[in-house]
Amino acid sequence: MRSTRRSLVKGFAASVLLPALLPVAAAAEAGKKPYWMGNGMPQEGPDTPKLADAIDYGWKPRGTGVPTDAAIRGVVQLGVYHVLAGGPPTLPWTIEILKPAYDKLKAAGVTMGNLMIDVSDNILYGRQGRDEDIEKIRQSLEAAGKVGVPVVEYNFYAHRAMEAYYEETGRGGAGITGVDYDRMKNLPPLPAQGAHNLTEMWANITYYLKAVVPTAEKANVRMALHPNDPPVPLSRGSQQIMATVAGWKHLIEIVNSPANGITFDCGVTREMGEDPVTVCRYFASRDRINHMHFRGPHIHKSYVRYDEGFLDEGDVNLFAVMRELIRNKYTHEFYPEHPRALDYDRARGPIQGYPGGGGYAGDVYDIAYGKAMLQAALIAERS
């Protein structure tokens, strides 16, 4: 997840949106809880989970980037007011780089809630130069905090098992994403990465967290480590620290701080054979979920073979997960990611990303489903 995974449709200027956005933005500014709009459906508020979608900022290699008016319209028309994306590719981030995008979104009533930051190979593998790279991340966290970005997400893969992905065919010929560990479990280490054991990787992330979490705390930024996805135990000769719930629990104990949290992925949780509701309760009750991915894969064999189809047909009780988030007062973003490949998107050109993955139409489906789950859970919790 080094960059935004999709581009959004074009439209009119963002200024046209502003009148429609002002009631929601004003309620948030006033600290109100806009759960109920008259006798209608409940809406997200300051103390509910925030539905989020990815957006393309168009970052330049060594300059600023701002989302287009069309990109902003593409999320707001879906009722989404919180966004996420890969951060600027060049480190360190600066206020001058981040602020134009943040300000343009804010003017349209949209919050930049999460930016993904790259962790260098020097940091991952404990190589020479890691202290200089860590310092760039610390400066980036400081800039994010000063601009107002609340969460910075990152990965810490010794190697990501992308070779396990392949495309399958789902209902009506839609593209879905299959994962089969047997396709890649015997692949050798890559020369540039080498093979690494758990002892090494835990030592490297411990060094990293002790250096950056104090900076994140001072900057009022929460860090969110994404779990291994696919959560295979051994990937090209390297063991993976975030491929078990035990690993997730150990991670938040290294530095005991809300700034040292996880991206809770209920789909990955099920892929590991764990109960997403129980795992959600453990981390949410400790205030260590700083970002959330809302997925429901269908599992054939835990850790080995599963597929990602539509949210309504997977093996995760997404309604129960949402209720657990609300009960534990989770107020950060939840992201219904990995849209399915629909003919509507295919007809408009090649689709980038995961095999069997989709585009904007698939995104619309996932966002609508996520919003329905949020509203249903809010009703259930207040009844």
Image (spheres, helix red, strand yellow):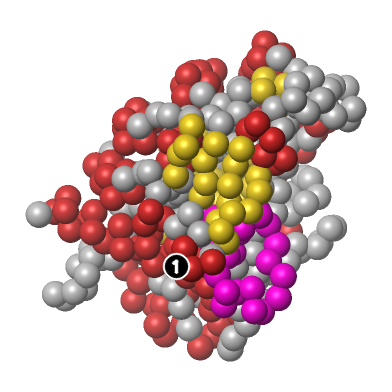
Q: Is residue 125 visible?
A: yes
Q: Residue 6, position in %: x, y?
A: 64, 64
Viewport quadrant of the C terminus: bottom left
What is the crowding at mark 1: few (fewer than 14 residues within 10 Å), some, or many (at least 20)?
A: some
- Tell me which segment is drawn in magenta: 337-358
Query: Would residue 338 be counted in the magenta stretch?
Result: yes
Q: Residue at x 66, y 48 (%)?
A: 166
Q: Mark 1 is on which residue type?
A: Tyr
Q: In the image, is 126 to the left or to the right of 320?
A: right
**Residue at the extreme left:** 383
In depth, the one of 303 and 148 nearer the eye is 303
Q: Quadrant of residue 95?
A: bottom right
Q: Quadrant of residue 313?
A: bottom left
Q: Residue at x 73, y 59 (%)?
A: 97
Q: Check the image and report above or below for 136 versus 207.
A: below
Q: Residue 12, position in %: x, y?
A: 58, 88
Q: Residue at x 40, y 82 (%)?
A: 20
In depth, the one of 368 and 63 nearer the eye is 368
Q: Is residue 258 visible?
A: no
Query: Would residue 32 be counted in the magenta stretch?
Result: no
Q: Residue 79, position in %: x, y?
A: 41, 72
Q: In the image, is 28 to the left or to the right of 13?
A: left
Q: Residue 66, position in %: x, y?
A: 68, 69
Residue that label 1 marks: 365
Assign the magenta stretch its main secondary structure: loop
